[in-house]
Amino acid sequence: MYHVHQLEPVHVLMPNDLTAPVGPGRPKDLAKRQAILEAAKQLFLTLGYASTSMDAVATAAGVSKLTVYSHFTDKETLFTAAISATCTAQLPELIFELPDGAPLEQVLLNIGCGFQALISSEQSVQLTRLIMTLGTQDPKLSQIFFEAGPLRVLREMEALLRRVDQRGLLRIEHPDKAAEHFFCLLKGAPNYRLLLGYAPALDAEAAQAHVEEVVGMFLSAYRP
Amino acid sequence: MYHVHQLEPVHVLMPNDLTAPVGPGRPKDLAKRQAILEAAKQLFLTLGYASTSMDAVATAAGVSKLTVYSHFTDKETLFTAAISATCTAQLPELIFELPDGAPLEQVLLNIGCGFQALISSEQSVQLTRLIMTLGTQDPKLSQIFFEAGPLRVLREMEALLRRVDQRGLLRIEHPDKAAEHFFCLLKGAPNYRLLLGYAPALDAEAAQAHVEEVVGMFLSAYRP
DNA sequence: GTCTATATAGCGATAGAC
DNA sequence: GTCTATCGCTATATAGAC
């Protein structure tokens, strides 16, 4: 069990989000702020940090460069805001419910397929790559990303596996570790190759087979 | 000893390696070439492609910038040479033997510990991050990296697991998939967090526990 | 607050001397 | 072959008009 909850991660970033028309004078144009943020999200994700110029962001957003600087102090601030917004928007809509009648295998297959689709998406891949390269330079980014995405999924799965254990469906001693194993297997070699750029994403058929195989192995390993 | 002979990826890169004092006129200074390559390897790995300037490489290598250009045509060529050299130097010294008397669990633990140490090394992490960011722009890099490192390890493990199955120690229907699962579990959440920059590498004790847990789960899943 | 035009700096690549 | 000095380009950030 690990926590990296130091330093109130959320409050630090709020001023750069869409919620704050603060400060003296006329309130700024929120629509333009939104447009800038959208453009920044797309460009940073596709081109990376260094290759994305403030000019390009301004042009894509349909505003002038100075307007960008007016809303966001500098390039780094804009980048952090864009990444943060992308992370919080990455709401994984996975179902972690365990109905009384539903067979466990089917529940795991559903979760597996949804997760597989999520991590195979272009946006997810790009975001992961970006965090991996820049997380070292700015640990706050890693924290924001991990706690907004992977950590929440892990926690929900952990809770589900605990219920599974309590009902005696499987024998799971450490639900946190088991949850990690499950998603780790789902990512697996295909996702590794995808992130590396060595192979494209699995097609629908292969993805389905992969999920079934992983669920099978997971059940084998934790069968009572 | 391994080879990466598909699509002659090697010959393309040889002129940039240390082996070629070719061409007319006085042979170039190989010591300087080596120094440049060493400096490039270190700087590219730590700073990334964009943030590493040719000036910095020249300074670090103790030569002038034009000497760098003399040995390597341009920045991209130098980068490819540096990454390629790093990949081939990443010799994983893992033992994939299966002595008659040795208990299977011990063999897997040995492989697991070696692999765990390899992927936790600073150089390995940096190299992986770099390939993930630039592999999309230059698929050759991904190919060089993957076939020089991960693929070779996978193949050896696959062969070992096939022997394990033949001896009846485990029931492994698809050794290739099983090998992927094994290393995937070994990497696991800790390595994912390490790559993201969210958490430091496991200490010796935790790493050992992690490997033992993974080996245990692997044996549970494939026990006949 | 927003725009056009510009100052300033850093980097990749090259010309010419030794 | 190697070095010093420089060109050309791009991008961040800012000054002044509306």
Image (tube, coloured by chain):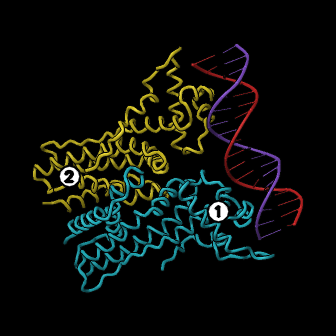
Chain colours: A yellow, B cyan, C red, D purple
- Residue A49 drawn at (x, y percent): 55, 44
Answer above or below: position of A166 versus A20.
below
Q: Chain of mark 1?
A: B
Please tell me which residue is depicted at 31% across the width and 49% down the height of the picture: A113
Depth check: A96 or A138 in front?
A: A138
Using the rendered view, name the quadrant where residue A159 is placed.
top left
- Residue B142 drawn at (x, y percent): 52, 61
Assess disc 1: are there few (<14), some (14-19) or many (≥20) residues with their C-alpha within 10 Å of its C-alpha: many
Answer above or below: position of B116 versus A185.
below
Question: Same chain for marks 1 and 2?
Answer: no
Using the rendered view, name the quadrant where residue B77 is placed.
bottom right
Answer above or below: position of B118 versus B196.
below
Disc 1 marks which amino acid? Leu
Depth check: B164 or B208 in front?
A: B208
Label 2 belongs to which residue?
A: A175
Please tell me which residue is depicted at 52% across the width and 72% down the height of the picture: B89
Cα–Cα gap, marks 1 and 2: 47 Å
Question: Secondary structure under badge 1?
Answer: helix
Label 1 belongs to which residue?
A: B78
Q: Which mark is residue B180?
A: none
Depth check: B46 or A212 in front?
A: B46
